[in-house]
Image: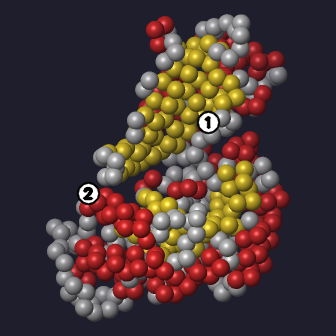
Amino acid sequence: MHDDRTSEEGLARTKQPNQLREMSIRRTTRGTQIQTPHGVWRYDRTGKFLSVSHQGWAVRRGLNHRMVESTASGEKGTMFREYRELTEVDKRAVIEEGRLLCAELTVVPNRLPGSSTQTAAQTAASARSMSAEQGLHPKQVSHADGDVHTDLQRILSWSERDLACDEEAFNAVYKPVSILPPDQYQALVVQISQGCSYNRCTFCDFYQGRPFHILSMAEFEAHLRAIRRFFGERLQDRTGIFLADGNALIVPYERLATMIERIRAELPEVQYGHQMSTFMDTFNLDRKSVDQLTTLRKMGLQTVYVGLESGSARVRRFLNKPGTPDEAIEAINLLKQAGYRVGVIVLLGVGGISFAEEHEQMTIQSLREIPFTQGDIIYLSPFVEPHNRAYFERLISAVGGDTPQQGGADIEVAPVTSEGWAAFSQAELVEIYWRWKKILADVAPQVQTTMYSILQHLY
Ligand code: SF4
């Protein structure tokens, strides 16, 4: 999410004079944006590279220097995106390209009558002199005190090697932030717990190898201090708070309420910091009453993202997901009674061809039974191969005719791929996505239905 409100802008050009007016540099409330005929480059308020995009293609950079490329294909109604994690070599190339562009730019202020054109050298000199006057390095001139010239200088002050150090700095504050809902990438993550208390669903390896842990109050306070140090002035650019990790709603009520209070008191500059959200698995409400849930909502916890995964009891058992679909719907109903906005996540293509028909029919039936209200979201998340073997072993066992451990009997044998299991191709998943989206527009017209590819995740 980018805020394009402009506080100052200028035209920009490279050394080729005929390119003037084809580019612009603008300051947004959160950083700097450079528009060129070949892409839009975005930098945060400290001059760190955020993203570049052009006609359906984009590269985004996370807080830990990970970068993910996305490429859109297809027409309206069949469109899908493919994602790729950039290698170190690719990352260096992207950063270098942005730096070269900035080094070449000449800024021509276009909002200030009588302003004169500056060459790149003058731009740099002006930024240096401003920094020098204040006895500051360009990195230390705050966005609020600077202008487009200092912005360029600040961007240039970050070498690729400097930016790569963000990985270590991030890891000193956070355990891996393995997954977030797509509309929470800009939130401030606070890990009030680490990992997942269950950690045995066969399709999910986000937290594997990590023991579940609820932070003590002392650890939590230290985490808040570390967050403040890491983000610095960028705290004001985060929108909302995400309580992590996999099922933070399991934190006992009193401690959760205290943590919410402390976050609001300690991190007041986070935009919409009173709007908090978290993940929950439907068996993890931990016996919280409607009254307690209502109190937590009034304190700020407003959105809960729920992993329904499937409305079929057999598919859920096959996935080793505790509880029946009815129990899952009951848990979501409880959240709705307490006034929460919900994001319900279902998996597309899970169980492969063997379970396809049952999974689709029963899941859409379950979604029909949820009392969605305006603002809720249904996420359709294409199944992605987990790194562990548990999922495949169960599926191979199912399509091979053996009874899976908890999967029940009478699973129909479906065509088996050369790998030995019945999966959907990428093209089939895209087709399934668009078909479900159309059906759900009738089933739950008040709710937005959207793609949730775990491959796009970046924090
Ligand atoms: S899907 Fe949810 S409950 Fe299951 S292992 Fe993953 S985080 Fe835990």
Q: Looking at this view, is 255 or 113 the one in front? A: 113
Residue 37: horizontal and vertical position, in percent? 44, 24
Disc 1 element: loop
Mark 1 crowdedness (10 Å alpha carbons): few <14, some 14-19, many ≥20: some
Q: Nearer the viewer, mark 1 or mark 2?
A: 1
Q: Is residue 355 above or below residue 97?
A: below
Q: Write down the residue under mark 2.
A: 427
Say which amino acid is labelled 1: Asp
Residue 47: horizontal and vertical position, in percent? 63, 32
Q: Looking at this view, is 409 or 428 the one in front? A: 428
Q: Are the residues tagged 1 and 2 within 8 Å (C-beta)?
A: no
Residue 396: horizontal and vertical position, in percent? 25, 78
Q: Looking at this view, is 343 or 193 the one in front? A: 343
In the rendered view, does 311 fall on the left or right side of 63? left
| Quadrant hosting residue 433 | bottom left
Disc 2 element: helix
Q: Is residue 209 visible?
A: no
| Quadrant hosting residue 359 | bottom left
Q: Is mark 2 within 8 Å of ligand 1?
A: no
> Which residue lies most toward the bottom here?
409
In the rendered view, does 159 fall on the left or right side of 147? left
Q: Write down the residue under mark 1.
A: 4
Say which amino acid is labelled 2: Ala
Residue 455: horizontal and vertical position, in percent? 42, 56
Q: Is residue 90 above or below residue 283?
A: above
In the rendered view, does 387 fall on the left or right side of 272? left
Give the residue at x 58% y 56%. 184
In the rendered view, does 23 fall on the left or right side of 32? left
Mark seen at residue 366: none
